[in-house]
Image (cartoon, rainbow, N blue to C red):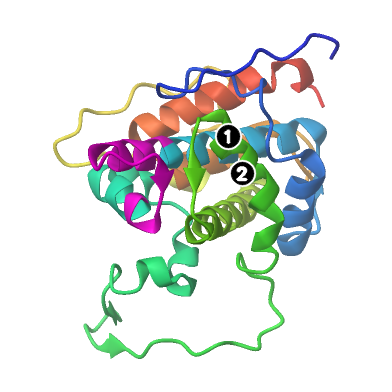
């Protein structure tokens, strides 16, 4: 592209296009996908995954900024992250990070199995299976760039948590996208939509969204943009899902065929 990016506004919720500030580069996105699946990731899929991750982190940062503003602070601290999630359950994403972060100790409470028996806290694992925690620091530059775009600063512990959430969320997104490819779509979910008690039913999906009973298009060894959008519908819900899908759709229009 030759057009110069527009300088993002420093206040207000998500007023800038996802194309104006891509903090998570395609090589980083593809590196995360390689950790969890051997499938090829198309260019448009990498753009879509970067856009979705950016939208989610932006929503979290904006929620934390509002919490900090209530206490007349401009620098974000981990407590602002907890307050943002407490106020908006849609922001509770990347939850695999929570057990690794001091910020969330005590927030999640005890873990119980299907019979209601308390599960002992897990010790540090030596498993060679890739996890969302491995390489979470790779997101630090993008997180700091995103914070600056929102006119925010954060203490190191807050940056660490945003790193971890981004890594955990993108890892889950990669796994779900790979599952969509393996299963030929999201047909096993049918057309059932997640509805939160007290919340109106979500609007119909985008015309070109892969969500629904029809099979996916494309080959069986490449994750496409539509596979990322399908995985997004499995990871998010409510207004955050609709907004994130719209922004990813807009961001990938030039490379939809890639």
Q: Residue at x 33, y 34 (%)?
A: 238
Q: In this view, does 46 lie to the left or right of 191?
A: right
From the image, tell me which residue sits under label 1: 148
Give the number of callouts. 2
Q: Are marks 2 and 1 in contact (CB under 8 Å)?
A: yes
Q: Is 194 contained in the magenta span?
A: no
- Rendered-image quadrant of the C terminus: top right
Work out whether residue 103 or residue 250 is closer to the camera in this orientation and state it. Answer: 103
Judged by its main secondary structure, the magenta piece is helix
Q: Residue furthest top?
A: 3
Work out whether residue 32 or residue 145 is closer to the camera in this orientation and state it. Answer: 145
Where's residue 65, x and y in %? 37, 38
Whether residue 186 is visible, yes or no, is: no
Whether residue 250 is visible, yes or no, is: yes
Q: What element carries label 2?
A: helix
- Position of residue 257 relative to residue 30, above or below, is above
Q: What element carries label 1?
A: helix
Determine crowd level at label 2: few under 14, some 14-19, many 20+ residues with C-alpha closer than 10 A: some
Q: Is 65 contained in the magenta span?
A: yes
Where's residue 212, x and y in %? 49, 32
Q: Is residue 210 left or right of residue 89?
A: right
- Position of residue 245 relative to residue 7, above or below, is below
* Residue 144: mark in rendering: 2
Instruction: Give the residues in magenta.
Output: 62-80
Determine crowd level at label 1: few under 14, some 14-19, many 20+ residues with C-alpha closer than 10 A: some
- Position of residue 176 relative to residue 36, above or below, is above
Q: Which residue lies furthest to the right in this view?
A: 2
């Amino acid at each position: 592209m030759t057009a110069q990016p527009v300088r993002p506004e420093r206040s207000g919720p998500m007023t800038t296009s996802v194309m104006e500030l891509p903090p998570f580069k395609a090589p980083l996105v593809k590196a995360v996908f390689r950790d969890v699946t051997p499938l090829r990731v198309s260019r448009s899929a990498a753009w879509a995954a970067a856009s979705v991750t950016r939208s989610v982190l932006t929503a979290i940062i904006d929620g934390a900024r509002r919490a900090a503003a209530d206490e007349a602070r401009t620098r974000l601290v981990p407590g602002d992250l907890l307050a943002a999630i407490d106020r908006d359950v849609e922001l509770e994403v990347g939850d695999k990070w929570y057990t690794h972060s001091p910020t969330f100790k005590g927030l999640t409470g005890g873990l119980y199995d299907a019979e209601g028996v308390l599960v002992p806290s897990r010790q540090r694992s030596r498993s060679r299976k890739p996890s969302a925690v491995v390489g979470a620091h790779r997101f630090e530059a993008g997180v700091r760039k995103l914070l600056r775009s929102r006119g925010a600063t954060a203490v190191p512990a807050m940056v660490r948590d945003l790193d971890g959430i981004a890594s955990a969320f993108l890892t889950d997104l990669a796994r779900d996208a790979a599952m969509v490819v393996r299963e030929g779509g999201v047909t096993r979910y049918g057309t059932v939509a997640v509805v939160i008690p007290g919340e109106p039913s979500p609007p119909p999906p985008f015309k070109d969204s892969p969500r629904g009973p029809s099979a996916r298009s494309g080959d069986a060894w490449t994750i496409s943009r539509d596979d990322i959008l399908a995985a997004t519908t499995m990871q998010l819900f409510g207004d955050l899902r609709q907004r994130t899908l719209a922004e990813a759709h807009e961001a990938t229009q030039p490379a939809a065929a890639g």
